[in-house]
Amino acid sequence: MSLLSVDYIKCNLCQKCVEACPFAAIDVIDDKIEFNEACKVCKICIKQCPEGAISLAETNQKSVNKDEYTGVLVFAEQVEGEVHPVTYELIGKGKELADKLGQDVNAVLIGHGFDKQAENILGYGVNNVYVYDQPELAHYRVEPYAAVLEDCIQKFKPTIILVGATSIGRSLAPRISTRFKTGLTADCTVLDVKENTDLIQIRPAFGGNIMAQIITPKHRPQMATVRYKVMTAPAEVENPTGKIVICSVDGSKLSSGVSVLQVTKKPQVDSIVDADVIIAAGRGVREEKDMKMLFELAELLNGKLAVTRPLIENGWGSYHQQIGLSGRSVRPKLIITVGISGSVQFVAGMKNAECIFAINSDPTASIFNVAHYGIVGDLYEVLPRLIEQVKEGGTIDAL
Amino acid sequence: MDILVCIKQVPETNEVEVDEKTGVLKRDGIDSKMNPYDLYAIETALQLKEEQGGRVTVLTMGPPQAEEIIREGFMMGADAGYILSDRRFAGADTLATGYTLASGVKKIGEFDLLICGMQTTDGDTAQVGPAIAEILQIPHVAYVNKIEGVTETNLTVQKDMADSIERVEVSFPALITVTKEVNQPRLPSFKRKLETRDWEIKMLTLDDFADRKEEHYGLKGSPTQVERIFPPESNVEKTTWEGSGEELAGLIYNKLKEMKFV
């Protein structure tokens, strides 16, 4: 019994598949290619086999009637009445997908004591906002929220559901996908849709340096979560034409084994480890007072200021700001290194950053080996102008 | 109290890379280890057991080699361990994985509390814990970062909500997923290693489950399908800019704006 089947007449035991398999899932047993439990069905062996001897076994899943499901539904997350901004980004993407299909994009808002939240969501151009405003929904608790979302899905039968990959979204979405026995793809970075309404979901897979394109070909609704700041929020429309639809579920369905005792706002923690954006200062910074400039840039980009070890030794920063083998490892979305040559020890602590900008006047500095964007220039020439530009906003053309 | 911890064996390194020329995944670092978040889950269980008494069972789905992480669980202090191993489980997405683990739990017995790490380092979905809770029809609390108190009937925890911390009480039976803030996991003990060396690890297959329908497990039970895999587009493309301070500032600014950092 295997998911992949081998045509043993074609197979000449060249073992290219064994070598190609990244999961060590293929063995040769009794002169036969066999797949073991480690197989992730990545299909690389199928491509690698020069004889075309490997094929995917049919799963014979029955398909739902896809025509019964239409439109994109966005889960409008709110905490204490505040709508999470990922909601608007999902609406932006949802509209794009819905337009391609010629269908609607709708939002579902779950909570208690709403004021203008639904109107605000309409302002982003959704066709309907389904509002469930009931006292049991004041705080996020998984069973009542799941019961409401289930009700909404059964009433409106969306083909696609988008949920923010927040702590609430990542807790609620798998509950719902499991309830409907349908597919859910986490942390999608790209979403598109086929003519047959299949959602194309792309995400990093098998550990991060590889992307996988995932579909849910036979089940509906198709569900995906997306992190905040991955998609783009649409501009607000001038005269929203969408409707607010008040919905409710029977209170008996809203019981929960969870009670929320207290909600406390988190104190701002000044940690570089969790920062999405980091400005890192190195020995190219000549004087301590110049650190202000870097700090200002960090503030403007909602980031944190970090330093290299020599600056710690100068006393220009504290240990918890140090990046490198002897300091912290960071993996921000963006790091701008300023006046850092890029020692191996430093690079080890930051090379996994998603996007690396390096500003250094020495074109041979080793930091340029890891930087995605290498800026060969004097930080004292570049930074003041960059800070000015960020403050002004706008776009600079023709560069 | 009876606690079950779901654990997973993951690759030692995340540095799986695609060879750009051949499109083949490089198989460096296929050494495996316990998913790091699961250590916190086991520690949470052990501390609760120390306070309330009871048993800690560790459960994993995977190949027979997953025995290593079950033994590691024993060395930390777990009392029993199970592996769900069957080729028919292969190719499972999060739904099929959740279903398989939940089927295993039902087979093994009744538990007051199930604990999972908040996510695995190879899949990073954080979906399997909530999926298990759904199938077992019990409440769950995700991203628990502090255990405040436990009684025979319920647990009081703090959970991380990104911008806020919530104190929450959940009644048993329930499932929680824990973050790395919840505790400091103990190291496996050599003494325990000797004591538990001969302990049996129970292997369960599809044939042991109440639901033996193959279409609920593995690839057949997975609504999602991987259509293709490919290297990320931004595979260390290097761009170098030279010019005046003003030009460089402009280039950086435009790029930051394009990437939505400003």
Image (cartoon, coloured by chain):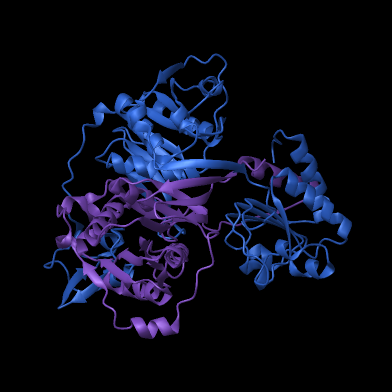
Chain colours: A blue, B purple
Quadrant in the rendering for residue B53: bottom left
Residue nearest the viewer, comparing A247 with B247: A247
Give the x, y percent position of residue A362.
76, 64
Give the x, y percent position of residue B262.
67, 40
Could you tell me which quadrant the N terminus of chain B lies in? bottom left
Give the x, y percent position of residue A335.
66, 55
Residue nearest the viewer, comparing A299 with B159: B159
Q: How many marks?
A: 0
Q: Name the side, left or right, on which B132 lies relative to A99.
A: left
Q: Name the side, left or right, on which B121 lies relative to A267.
A: left
Q: Is residue B180 above or below residue A144?
A: below
Q: Is residue B153 above or below residue A360?
A: above
Quadrant in the rendering for residue B254: top right
Q: Is residue A11 above or below residue A237?
A: below
Quadrant in the rendering for residue A313: bottom right
Residue nearest the viewer, comparing A283 with B159: B159
Q: Name the side, left or right, on which A299 lies relative to A181.
A: right
Specify the farthest residue to the left.
A9
Give the x, y percent position of residue A271.
67, 56
Q: Is residue A232 above or below residue A236?
A: below
Q: Is residue B125 visible?
A: no
Residue nearest the viewer, comparing B162 with A310: B162
Residue depicted at 32% across the width and 64% down the height: B59
Residue depicted at 27% across the width and 52% down the height: B99
Q: Is residue A160 visible?
A: yes
